[in-house]
């Protein structure tokens, strides 16, 4: 299908749009004069006639009461009857005003509807022309592109035929040379394969011999290792029983020290004095460490397990001093007006863990991973803290935190 030129666009509805728009733009604002309203004049004539008739009837009735003679009462009665109809006439004016205003609004809306209708039709006609014009422009481009494509295609066909002829000649020559090279490679492969098989067989023989020798050596080494393992396991069991005994003894000593420090801490009432006691316990532990001949600095890394294992040495002295610091800090918090376990349990637990954090840091700084593991194991075994809380404290200390951070 070929598209034709639609020509220049010519609007069918432009004059109608301009005419309606002119009526909308020049439309006067709404106003109402009841004297110029024909409906009002009809109501006026009707109520005036009714008022005059009522006035005559009222005057006649009043005169009959005095024997047919006119009097002031008859005049007044007639005027009142007429006035009633005039009052009813005035009550019609608001209704006529609303009716006139409604007609004005309806006429205005009708003009806008006409404008929108003409505008919609105008848009449809313009879109129709625009589509036809776009199709025509596409047709021109299509015809031009097709002409150029046909020319390019003929040129490509000629070029392909020439290149294909050249390729065939090159292919035939390469095939001849490839066949010669393939036969040479097959002969070479067969020779190398025979040589490889001989080498493989020799290497396999030597490998089998070496394997048997390694098996014999492994069996001998395994027997030696088993004997050494049995001896070392027995020695470890003896050291473990000794360490357990030392741990139980140190736990009893720590409890006595803890009870004594708690008794002394309860005698203090001010936060500054309790802080001083904590510093004093810290200094005493340092002096104990410098005067000790046993124990060691320990390693800064260790296991997460909180078992009954004790590492011996002076680590339990540091634990005891740290526990005294916990008691002093806890007592200071309570007497300084801090949160109680009853008014704010969450805050009380964080304060308690913060105190254990100080003691565990003390053990870690003076006896490394052994110190902190011994202390936290002791606290878990005594039911002071849970295993999960002990793990939180240990991880924060090993991470380098200077104070406990609630999680």
Image: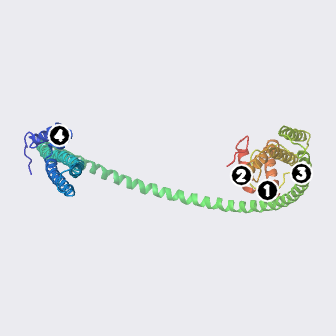
Disc number for residue 191:
none
Q: Is disc 2 in contact with disc 4, using a CB cutoff of under 8 Å?
A: no
Which residue is labeled 4 in the image?
Answer: 24
Which residue is labeled 2 in the image?
Answer: 346
Q: Say which residue appears at 14% left-offset and 42% top-offset.
A: 36
Regarding residue 296, the answer to whether it shows in the image is: yes
Going by the image, does 63 lie left or right of 207? left
Which residue is labeled 1 in the image?
Answer: 380
Tally the marks: 4
Quote the CA–CA distance across marks 2 and 1.
Answer: 20 Å
Which residue is labeled 3 in the image?
Answer: 254
Q: Please identify, in this view, whether the residue under mark 2 or under mark 1 is nearer the observer.
A: 2
- Which circle's residue, 2 or 3, is located before the other in the chain? 3
Mark 2, residues whose alpha carbon is within 10 Å: few (<14), some, or many (≥20)?
some
SS assignment at label 1: helix
Quote the CA–CA distance across marks 4 and 3.
Answer: 102 Å
Q: Please identify, in this view, whether the residue under mark 2 or under mark 3 is nearer the observer.
A: 2
Regarding residue 149, the answer to whether it shows in the image is: no
Q: Is disc 2 in contact with disc 3, using a CB cutoff of under 8 Å?
A: no
Going by the image, does 1 lie left or right of 186? left
Of residues 294 and 25, the one nearer the viewer is 25
- Which circle's residue, 1 or 4, is located before the other in the chain? 4
Quote the CA–CA distance across marks 2 and 4.
Answer: 75 Å
Q: Say which residue appears at 89% left-offset and 53% top-offset.
A: 255
- Residue 334, image x, y percentages: 81, 46
Going by the image, does 40 lie left or right of 199? left
SS assignment at label 4: helix
- Residue 70, image x, y percentages: 18, 51
Quote the CA–CA distance across marks 2 and 3.
Answer: 28 Å
């Amino acid at each position: 299908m070929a598209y034709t030129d639609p020509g220049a666009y010519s609007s069918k509805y432009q004059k109608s749009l301009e005419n309606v728009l002119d009526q909308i733009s020049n439309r006067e604002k709404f106003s109402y004069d009841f004297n110029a309203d024909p409906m009002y004049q009809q109501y006026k004539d009707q109520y005036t006639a009714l008022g005059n008739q009522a006035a005559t009837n009222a005057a006649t009735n009043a005169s009959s009461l005095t024997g047919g003679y006119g009097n002031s009462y008859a005049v007044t009665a007639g005027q009142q009857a007429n006035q009633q109809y005039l009052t009813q006439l005035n009550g019609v004016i608001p209704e006529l005003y609303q009716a006139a205003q409604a007609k004005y609004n309806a006429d205005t809306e009708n003009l806008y509807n006409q404008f929108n209708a003409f505008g919609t039709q105008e848009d449809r006609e313009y879109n129709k022309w625009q589509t036809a014009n776009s199709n025509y422009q596409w047709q021109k481009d299509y015809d031009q592109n097709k002409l150029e494509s046909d020319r390019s295609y003929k040129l490509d066909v000629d070029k392909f035929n020439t290149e294909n002829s050249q390729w065939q000649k090159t292919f035939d020559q390469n095939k001849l040379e490839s066949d010669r090279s393939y036969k040479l490679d097959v002969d070479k492969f067969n020779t190398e394969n025979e040589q490889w098989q001989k080498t493989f067989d020799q290497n396999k023989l030597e490998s089998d011999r070496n394997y048997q020798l390694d098996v014999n050596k492994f069996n001998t080494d395994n027997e030696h290792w088993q004997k050494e393992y049995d001896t070392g396991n027995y020695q470890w069991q003896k050291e473990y029983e000794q360490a357990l005994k030392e741990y139980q003894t140190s736990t009893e000593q720590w409890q006595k020290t803890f009870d004594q420090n708690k008794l002394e801490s309860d005698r203090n009432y001010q936060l500054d004095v309790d802080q001083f006691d904590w510093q004093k316990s810290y200094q005493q532990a340092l002096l104990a460490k410098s005067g000790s001949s046993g124990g060691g600095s320990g390693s800064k890394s260790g296991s997460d397990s909180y078992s009954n294992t004790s590492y011996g040495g002076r680590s339990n002295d540091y634990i005891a001093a740290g526990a005294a610091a916990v008691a002093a800090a806890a007592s200071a918090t309570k007497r300084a007006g801090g949160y109680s376990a009853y008014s704010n349990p969450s805050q009380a637990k964080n304060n308690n863990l913060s105190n254990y954090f100080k003691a565990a840091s003390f053990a870690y700084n003076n006896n490394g991973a052994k110190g902190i593991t011994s202390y936290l194991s002791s606290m878990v075994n005594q039911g002071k803290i849970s295993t999960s809380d002990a793990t939180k404290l240990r991880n924060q200390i090993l991470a380098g935190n200077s104070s406990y951070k609630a999680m």
